[in-house]
Image: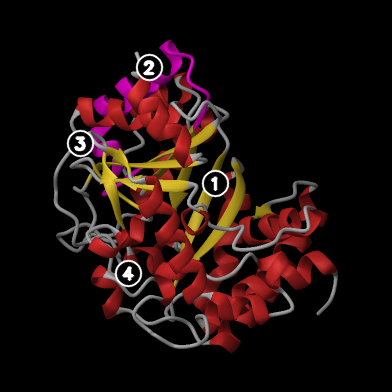
Amino acid sequence: MLDVQTCRKGAAMGLKMLVLSLTGDCNLACRYCYASGQARHTMAWETARRAVDLAASCGEPFLLQFSGGEPLLALPLLARIAAYVRDHRIEAHMAVQTNGTLLTEEAVNILCDSNIGIGVSLDGRPALHDRQRQYSDGRGSAADVAAGIERLARRGVGIGLTCVVTAENVHSLTDVVDMAYYFGNVHRVGFDLLRAQGRGTNAALPRESDMAAAMREVFARRDALYRLTGRRLAISQEEQARSLRAFCSRGFAHCHAMNGEGVHVASDGSIYACSSLVGDARFFLGTVESGVDARRQKEVAAMMQEKMSFCARCPDFTACGGACFARWLGTERDEPCASECALKRAAVRQVSGTS
């Protein structure tokens, strides 16, 4: 049951997205992991329940994203949360972002039975993927990821792929498109730029020109395979640009955190504005016990937008939605990440039909 006090706090937030870090633990040691500094702690059931109730108390549908660490290491907790959402008829669209190595028959059954959307991380063909996404003993993870995706394909389950783009794999992004078509059950591919946090400080961002060229090649390869197969693969950045353009968006519409509409709940129950800002007191918003400080949430959102106000001067702003604050943080430059702009601008050009 939701108590009245929690409802009042939740209603003030107007949450559209709740990210639950089910555990800080992970079975991989990816070279660029921005969350590598998280405490390897698994969320208690009561913490998870309070967080879901807090979001549900707003009375509006919301996205419930299971994250980590590797969320499937906490599979019993994930299953219990999903059952709670179902049994209490909470209007939440549930999704999980996983490294794909733990997509066992048990995990697949739970995810499918609970109608949980599935995103899998894949950085390229096996040799490249294995250089970036390894087990702690140095073994590559590509074979296990492929086995998990194929297990989902046999069940007829569609998924999304997320590729983290670094200077090392930027010239091979069309390989991710090829693999999406190869697996047959991938409906969407998104490209997420490296964040210089955690172990991400040891990797390099792609150059702006390389990012722009890579995305042109991605769209060309997707379009060629669409003509060949009759199956169109969605590219997340393109879909976002199309949506923002259609609704004549204003402001930083790409990011719930920057609009005060999303929160990240760490495994210990502390609440932050964004997954990339966990542990930074400047972005602490409360706890699942005390609720979100609505005034603080508005202040943080306003501060993030003010810091990124240079984005509003760009002619592509309304179709782009602005750059990522967490990726910019620490640079203190009066401009966004150039490779991020190249990534988003390529999508905007694709949608508008200009080159």
Q: Which of marks 1 and 4 is in front?
A: 1
In this view, the residue in front, 163 or 245, is 245
Residue at screen point 48% across, 20% down: 90
Secondary structure of the residue carrying tag 4 is helix
Whichever of callouts 1 and 4 sits on the residue coming sooner in the sequence is: 4
- Residue 270 at x, y percent in the picture: 23, 45
Residue linked to disc 4? 131
Whichever of callouts 1 and 3 sits on the residue coming sooner in the sequence is: 3
Any mark on residue 209, and which?
Answer: none
Marks 1/4: CA distance?
21 Å
Residue at screen point 39% across, 85% down: 332
- Residue 329 at x, y percent in the picture: 38, 75
Marks 3/4: CA distance?
30 Å
Amino acid type for the residue under numbered disc 2: Ala
Marks 4/2: CA distance?
37 Å
Amino acid type for the residue under numbered disc 3: Met
Whichever of callouts 3 and 2 sits on the residue coming sooner in the sequence is: 3
Magenta stretch holds residue 91: yes
- Residue 318 at x, y percent in the picture: 71, 66
Residue linked to disc 1? 160
Check whether the beta carbons of the residues at disc 3 and disc 2 lie within 8 A of each other: no
Residue linked to disc 2? 83
Above or below 41: residue 255? below
Amino acid type for the residue under numbered disc 1: Gly
